[in-house]
Every structure is written in C-alpha cells, then in structure tokens.
C-alpha cells in the first residue's frame, strides 16, 4: 500500500514564535466549535474544487489537494483569517511553502520521512537560522497534520469516500482528534540556540534568564492543575517517541535545560 507524504519546499520565511507563557493569566475559551466549523467548510471547499476539476483523482491525491488548499507555513490565508477574527477568544487580542506529493511503501517509512523533513526545517531554515529555536511542539503539530492526511484515505474518524458525485467527506472533522498537550511549548519545550540568527538575538541565554521569572506563576494552583491534566491525558505520539530516541542518541539537541519544570524545581 502506498502512503501519502506531504513534502514541504521552502519559498520564503517569515519568522514568528509563540509566547506560551504570556496567556497563563488569561486562559482562552474552548473555541473548538468555531474552529471545527471553519475547518469543515474549508475541507468542503477543497472537495468542491477537486470534484469539479480532478474528479478522477485517487484518494491520496485528493487528500494532498485538501492539504494544499489549507496552505503550509506561516501567514497562510487561513492563519490570517484566524488572526483577524473577532469571534475567537485570543490573547493578546488582536514559511510559505509549496506542497508536493511523494509515495512510499510503508506507513512507518512515511512517518519517519515526514518527521525528518520537519527536523530539517527546525535545524536550519525555519528554526535555527530564522529564529534560533528548534521547536519540538511545532514538529508534533506538523505530525498530527500528517496523520490527518493519512486518516483521509484510511477510514480515520474523518475520511474520504467515493460517491456518484465524486469525493465526499465521511464524518465531521474535529480538531480535538489531533490537538494534544505536546503542542504546548511550555509542556513540550523547545531548544534555543546560542548563535546569532536572523532575529539578531541569541536565544538560549535570554530564555534561561527569563523563564525563572515565571516560576511563581508556574507553581500556582491554576497552572499546576493544567500540567497535572496534561500528565493525565498526554499520550506520546510516534513522533514524540521517535524524536526522544534521536535526542538520546545525540542526533537532536536536548531541550530539557529549557523545561520550566526543571528550572523551577532547581
């Protein structure tokens, strides 16, 4: 069986990082209902275009076109729409790629190749060079997007089926099937490089100097409750486990010195 592999080819880079500690006193509402509605509308729009212009395509090609419709990288149309939306509870309120497709023979090979391409981006162009950050949380969100692509053609919770009208979506897309605690960079910490980057700010020392300022907030009942909840329901994905193996082999940088739990317990 062939497996769909999204390959990301860099065109331009716009550096941008999340401050995962900033909103600890302003935790946003659960907006999954709004996001799911938006994502399902976008999937249907992609399917309408596929059935109009590519009706005879395979399921794997249809899945690839759905991913391409969403866009990959920073400042995609969907991201801009979410940033400008007044319906979302955000705090504070108010990498462009091309998608190619390749097919590999095994699911594990597809997973490792997809992860490897994410690692390349974090080690070089998107991470180290642009921002000085190797984000393991970014790699997990990338991986979950890859699983969504696989699910579309493998009877996942939301998948494609062929009908007399063309390709249709079976089930309703639910973002909660893919979001997990390892998307949170305070729980799944990044590695910060010492050397200069395009932002002209060495990150490692700045981060190590600033994280201790959040220890009192981290030790509050509210944030401890969040981390306890994460611990109770976090199930490491294949990607999380695979990346940990590479860290232990010395093939990836070790982010543990930047983990707020470690810093605040010292």
Image (cartoon, rainbow, N blue to C red):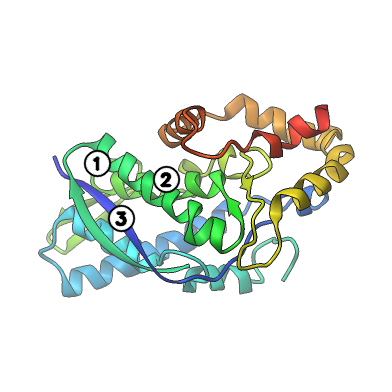
Tell me where residue 79 appears, x and y as whole percent.
53, 68
Dot 1: what SS?
A: loop
- Residue at 34% x, 47% y is 114
Looking at the image, tell me whether mark 2 or mark 1 is earlier in sequence order: 2
| Viewer can see residue 173 | no
Contact (Cβ within 8 Å) of mark 3 with mark 1:
no
Image quadrant containing the N terminus: top left
Tell me where residue 3 appears, x and y as whole percent.
21, 45
Give the quadrant of residue 19: bottom right
Report the side of 249 relative to 152 (left or right).
right
Q: CA distance from mark 3 to mark 2?
A: 10 Å
- Residue at 62% x, 24% y is 232
Of labels 2 and 1, the one closer to you: 2
Q: CA distance from mark 2 to mark 1?
A: 16 Å
Of residues 17 and 29, the one nearer the viewer is 17
Q: CA distance from mark 3 to mark 1?
A: 16 Å
Looking at the image, tell me whether mark 3 or mark 1 is earlier in sequence order: 3
Q: Residue 143, which numbered label? A: 2
* Circle 1 Cα neighbour tier, 10 Å, few/some/many (<14 / 14–19 / ≥20): some
Tell me where residue 86 appears, x and y as whole percent.
66, 71
User: Residue under circle 3?
Assistant: 6
Contact (Cβ within 8 Å) of mark 2 with mark 1:
no
User: Residue under circle 1?
Assistant: 154
């Amino acid at each position: 069986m062939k497996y769909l592999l999204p390959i990301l080819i860099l065109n331009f880079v716009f550096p941008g990082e999340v401050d995962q500690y900033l909103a600890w006193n302003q935790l946003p509402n659960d907006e999954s209902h709004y996001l799911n509605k938006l994502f399902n509308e976008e999937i249907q729009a992609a399917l309408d275009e596929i059935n109009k212009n590519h009706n005879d395509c395979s399921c794997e090609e249809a899945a690839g076109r759905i991913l391409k419709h969403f866009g990959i990288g920073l400042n995609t149309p969907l991201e801009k729409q979410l940033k400008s939306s007044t319906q979302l509870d955000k705090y504070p309120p108010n990498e462009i790629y091309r998608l190619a497709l390749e097919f590999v023979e095994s699911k594990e090979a597809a997973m490792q190749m997809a992860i490897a391409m994410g690692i390349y981006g974090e080690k070089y162009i998107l991470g180290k060079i642009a921002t000085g950050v190797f984000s393991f949380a970014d790699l997990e969100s990338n991986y979950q997007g890859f699983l969504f692509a696989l699910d579309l053609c493998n009877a996942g919770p939301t998948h494609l089926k062929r009908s007399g009208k063309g390709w249709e979506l079976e089930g309703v897309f639910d973002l909660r099937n893919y979001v997990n605690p390892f998307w949170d960079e305070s729980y799944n910490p990044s590695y910060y490089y010492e050397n200069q980057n395009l932002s002209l700010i060495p990150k490692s020392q700045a981060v190590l100097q600033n994280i201790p300022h959040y220890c009192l907030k981290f030790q509050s009942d509210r944030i401890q409750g969040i981390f306890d909840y994460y611990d109770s329901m976090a199930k490491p994905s294949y990607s999380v486990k695979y990346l940990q193996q590479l860290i232990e082999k010395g093939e990836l940088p070790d982010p543990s010195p930047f983990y707020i739990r470690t810093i605040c317990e010292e």
